[in-house]
Amino acid sequence: MQTQILKSKLATVPSPLKPGDLLQVIAPSGALREFGDFQKGVDIWRSRGYRVEIISEIDRTWGYLAGEDEHRRNHLAAAWEDSECRGILCARGGFGTTRLLENWTWSFSSSTQKDKTFKNNKNTISKNGKVSSAKWLIGFSDITALLWSLYKEGISGVHGPVLITLGKEPQWSIDRLFDWVEGRPLKSLSGNGWNGGIAQGNLLPANLTVATHLLGTPMQPNLEGVILAIEDVTEAPYRIDRMLTQWRMSGALAKVSGIAVGRFSQCEAPAKSSSFSVEEVLRDRLGDLNIPIISDLPFGHDGCNAVLPVGVPVELNADTGVLSFG
């Protein structure tokens, strides 16, 4: 298999964080219930010297959501436009960020790529014409919708632990998060190579379910030449099959240069049921694409969730099973 080369445009990585910087915590998705785990995540950031500001009514609920759409949308916009805020930390995933992005765009408000303002279809959220520079956005799972929408506009976010999961990470994974946001290089990750071959491209991490529901919407970024990284939780093998079949039939999978497969946790069919295993589904739906694939990489739910930066150049070597960062 020949080496596949980077085709898509690189994203802008925000300038490195440093202790003393202000970070804001929002809950853009599901209602926060894991308050002990949440506090552990906040404490880790504060122990590193960061000022962490938690939005008011972080415990607000509206059904399964952390408040009404406008409530959550306003917190996201306020954090984005705050000129002192250097990064946005997501409390948890669940469901809800796609609702925030309905009829919204991240659009340029100046001639420089890093200066952007959050707008919706009716209002410019930036107050008094202030410009909000690119800042860090950190999360995974349902936060995929925000990460993808930012990447589509040329800004790199971080696919990594939300606050309720950060305290459960091994120390090397926590250190990896701070290495990346503070400007230090990332170490490679190792898994099991399929097919062989080497692909280079922008890394585009995602929760498979969330990403599948972004296909064909304005929030779908250009997939041409990307290295797609996927993970999921509590999805039965037939549902994973259904989603990957949609990716195939839509032509989306034909555009990617390589695939990095993380953890598919709690996804196996019940014992003694008539079903393929998750691995069998993945190999059936992905194995004939004639692109490099690496499985069993340490990211996703229910285990180590190694940071994956969005939109940066990577090399996926299916001969050695190594995903390396440029």
Image: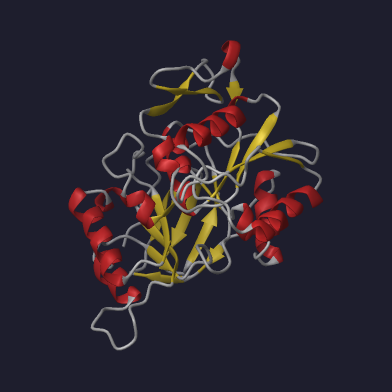
Snapshot colouring: secondary structure
Which quadrant of the structure image shows residue 274? bottom left
Residue positioned 22% across, 59% down in the render: 245
Q: Is residue 215 left or right of residue 109?
A: left
Q: Is residue 146 above or below residue 197?
A: above
Q: Is residue 62 left or right of residue 279?
A: right
| Total residue callouts | 0
Q: Is residue 122 left or right of residue 89?
A: left
Which quadrant of the structure image shows residue 269? bottom left
Front in this rendered view, residue 56 or 196: 56
Q: Residue furthest left?
A: 249
Front in this rendered view, residue 193 or 298: 298
Front in this rendered view, residue 262 or 44: 44
Residue 134 seen by the camera: no
Give x and y (percent) for residue 253: 27, 53
Which quadrant of the structure image shows residue 165? bottom right
Residue positioned 47% across, 20% down in the render: 108
Q: Residue furthest top?
A: 128
Residue positioned 67% across, 24% down in the render: 83
| Quadrant in which the N terminus appears | bottom left
Give x and y (percent) for residue 135: 61, 33
Q: Is residue 9 above or below residue 294?
A: above
Give x and y (percent) for residue 56: 66, 37
Residue positioned 40% across, 52% down in the render: 227
Residue 44 seen by the camera: yes
